[in-house]
Image (tube, rainbow, N blue to C red):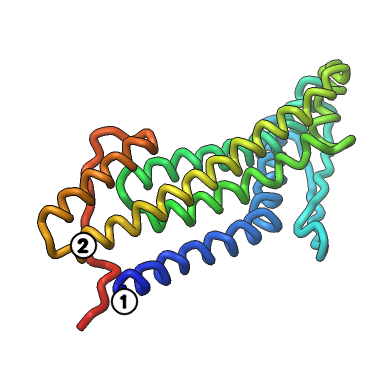
Amino acid sequence: MAKRYIHERHYDEYLIAGIISFNIIAAFIAPFFHELFHALVLEIYNCGYWTEFHLSMFTGLYATVFKSCILTRTQEAIVYLSGVLGTLFIGFSLLYLDWKLTKKGLLEYSVFTSFAALGFLFSPTLYFFAGEGDLINALEMLNLSAYSGFLPLIGLAIAFFSIGYLMWNLKHTTELEILEEEIETAKDSKIRKWLKKRMKKKYDKFGIKKTKLRHHKKYNPKR
C-alpha cells in the first residue's frame, strides 16, 4: 500500500500543475495569442497597427488592436475571426496531442496537456456567448447577423466536448496509472497477467488499439 500511496501522490502533483496551468493559460497566455493572431492577419494584409494591452484582476489580460488602413468587409471579418479561431485551433491541437500522449502511455503528461488545452479553449468559447465582440462583428461584416443566435449553441457544443473529454481523460488515466503500479508491484505471475488484460481492455475502451503496454519504475521509491 505504501508504494501505491507514493504513486497517487506523484500523480496528484501533475493534476495540481494542470489546474494551475489552466488558470494561467486562460487568463494570460490564450488572450495574448488571441491578439497575436489579429496582428498576424494584419501583417499579411500589410496593414499598420498598434496594440494596447491591459491587465485586470477580474478579466485577466486583454488588449485592443488598432489598425491604420482600410480593409474590405471580408478582410475585416477575417481579422475579427482570427483571434477566436486561432486560439480554438491551438486548444483542439493540444487535445489531439493529449490523446497521442495517452496512446504512448505518458499518462501523467496527458493530464497536464488536458488542462492546458482547456485553458486555450476557455477564452475563445466565451465569445460565443457574448452579445458583442469579435464574432458578432465578423458576422455583421459578412451580412450574417441573422445567424448570431446560433453562436451560443456552438459555444455550448465546444464547452460540453472540452469538459467531457477532460473528465473522461482524468477517469481513464487515473485508472491506468494505478493499474501500472499494481502490475509493477504484483508478485504473483497470474495476478500480473490478469492485471495486464484489464489494462489492455481499458486502453481499448479509450479508443486505443494495439497499444504496447509500458511498465516503468518511476513511481517506486529509491532504496
* Location of residue 212 by image quarter: top left
* Location of residue 128 by image quarter: top right
Residue 2's disc number = 1
- State the quadrant of the C terminus: bottom left
Of helix, strand and loop, which one carries label 2? helix
The residue that appears at 86% across and 16% down in the rendered structure is: 143
Nearest the eye: 172 or 86: 172
**Vertical order, 204 against 53 (above or below):** above
Nearest the eye: 29 or 101: 101
- State the quadrant of the N terminus: bottom left
**Vertical order, 215 against 213 (above or below):** below
Residue 118 x/y as whole percent: 60, 48
Most extreme residue toward the bottom is 223
* Amino acid type for the residue under numbered disc 2: Glu
Residue 184's disc number = 2
The residue that appears at 78% across and 53% down in the rendered structure is: 62
Residue 46 shows in this picture: no
Residue 97 x/y as whole percent: 43, 43
Residue 26 x/y as whole percent: 67, 54
